[in-house]
Image (cartoon, rainbow, N blue to C red):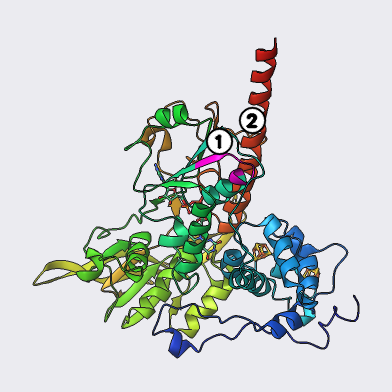
Amino acid sequence: MAERMLKFVGTSQAMPDKRPAAERRRDFDEIYSSYAREKAAEQAARCSQCGVPFCQIHCPLSNNIPDWLKLTAEGRLEEAYELSSATNNFPEICGRICPQDRLCEGNCVIEKGFDAVTIGSVEKFITDTAWSQGWVKPIRPRRERTESVGIIGAGPAGLAAAEQLRRKGYQVAVYDRYDRVGGLMIYGIPNFKLEKDIVQRRETLLRDSKVTFHLDCEIGRDISLEELRRRHSAVLIATGVYKARDIQAPGVGLPGIAAALDYLTASNRSGLGDSVPGIESGALHAEGKNVVVVGGGDTAMDCVRTAVRQGAKSVKCLYRRDRANMPGSQREVKHAEEEGVEFVWLSAPQAFLGKANSDGERVSHVRTVRIHLGMPDASGRQAPQEIPNSHVNIEADLVLKALGFDPENLPEALAAPDLGVTSWGTLDIDWRSMMTSLEGVFAAGDIVRGASLVVWAVRDGRDAAERIHAYLATKALAAQRIAAE
Ligand code: FAD
Ligand code: SF4
Ligand code: SF4
């Protein structure tokens, strides 16, 4: 092993080629190309095969990273794929969009001094190769079971659970209010991070595995939760969190101010070929506009970079803390800066000013105030404090609010008053069984955790599938016993 691995001293870290910013600004294609086979092997061989792999400890899926890196370095790609797909339903997706700098790579032991092993890029390479070689096959369970599971939500949590349950032979039906499969992977995350055909080939695989999809079907509106519970032996709620947090400031209702997810969904739909009124009217399009995005998370980063690609005149990101304290990935900030986004740190909106034109009044400026970070609050984060008389007016024709998401009122939306929720509005589950307060109804993903990451949704979906299997197996056993008595 030593001959092939441990090459981090002599071999520098090399990411796959990144397209120049000037080229990236003109299209929505992914910004990184793929490794060539030799490059992937060379980079995988930088791993020092740690006895205690911190990369694996900090991967939410506990991926067996050192072993698949070694297999890649040895050119044993099919085995690397088998191993990597054993713990992750979407390795090529996580390889693209996990914030690796905060997870696996940020904790790679060679990071200090030699730059981390490029784990995400190798993971993506392995599974993209598996797809191109035909190694990714539909599921053919060893035995079919009669019990069926209804899953509400075709995002990563619902899809990971669907795949795992199908592997065990359950009949799986996924319901989604959207017209496409993928949740935020299809309508939230932009193409330049995750091209849509990557998500769509996963959908095809699940359909070929005999998972059924009921799209344009909102539970609570088109079918009741009660009806779903009658139809299926168990139900999984994986509905994500979609209630956008708003800004409390004068003028926030002016035309020209939009919610980030409405803007990103319109852009993604348009990229998929849909006709989108907000794009056609220009209301949700940034071309020729001065764009101001308020927020510092992943959604804000996606908005600023989308606005650049739509041909905005200028793009500014307003964030009330500083670079070191922002929730978004530092890698994303770097990409955005390269693409021409200006970050206005320590700055918050105080009011939105309008200007009348032939169409009526529209937003024209954001009145901002400078922020000083004070003493840490109960959460340990420094509390932002406004600096008196520090106002600046920033020109803005389109303002996008990207302040995060809260759960909808699910007991109300699902007409299920007995469905228990936490004080945050997320679903209250028994963490051992992952069951909600309703018998046979489980929950996973953002609706339990609050707005999080795809990799955590996959983890939760897998865990929920295990718990549903345990629940149904126990029930089947009890039924057999009663029948035998
Ligand atoms: P979702 O993906 O939200 O899927 C929930 C599904 O449930 C949706 O399809 C919805 O239509 C459906 N649904 C809801 N209610 C009903 C109902 N009543 N009936 C039927 N269907 C219903 N994470 C990363 O790891 N990396 C990133 O780079 C990243 N970027 C992001 C960018 C943006 C703009 C956003 C908003 C999020 C981003 N995330 C990212 C977070 C990630 O997308 C989520 O954490 C993840 O998708 C959550 O998965 P989920 O399955 O719980 O929910
Ligand atoms: Fe890293 Fe995410 Fe892959 Fe885990 S799933 S190894 S955190 S990129
Ligand atoms: Fe390899 Fe880094 Fe993981 Fe150690 S921490 S096993 S060097 S990838």
Q: Is residue 471 above or below residue 129?
A: above
Q: Are marks 1 and 2 in contact (CB under 8 Å)?
A: yes
Q: Nearer the viewer, mark 1 or mark 2?
A: 2
Q: How many marks?
A: 2
Query: Which residue is found at the position 64% from the left and 30% from the top?
Result: 471
Q: Quadrant of the C terminus?
A: top right
Q: Which image quadrant for residue 97?
A: bottom right
The residue to which callout 2 is attached is 471
The answer to which of 367 and 479 lies nearer the viewer is: 479
Q: Is residue 285 above or below residue 413?
A: below
Residue 309 shows in the view: yes
Where on the image, by quarter, is ligand 2? bottom right
Residue 168 lies in the magenta stretch:
yes
Q: Position of residue 463 (x, y in %)?
A: 65, 44
Q: Quadrant of the N terminus?
A: bottom right
Give left or right: position of 366 versus 1.
left
Q: CA distance from mark 1 to mark 2?
A: 10 Å
- Could you say which disc has been placed on residue 307 in the image? none
Residue 370 shows in the view: no
Query: Which residue is found at the position 42% from the left and 33% from the top?
Result: 411
Q: Which image quadrant for residue 29?
A: bottom left
Residue segment shown in magenta: 165-172
The residue to which callout 1 is attached is 442
User: Circle 2 — which element?
Assistant: helix
Q: Position of residue 329 (x, y in %)?
A: 57, 69
The answer to which of 433 and 170 lies nearer the viewer is: 170
Give left or right: position of 66 versus 394.
right
User: Circle 1 — which element?
Assistant: strand
Q: Amino acid at mark 2?
A: Tyr
The answer to which of 447 and 236 lies nearer the viewer is: 236
Residue ranking furthest to the left: 358
Give left or right: position of 188 versus 257.
right
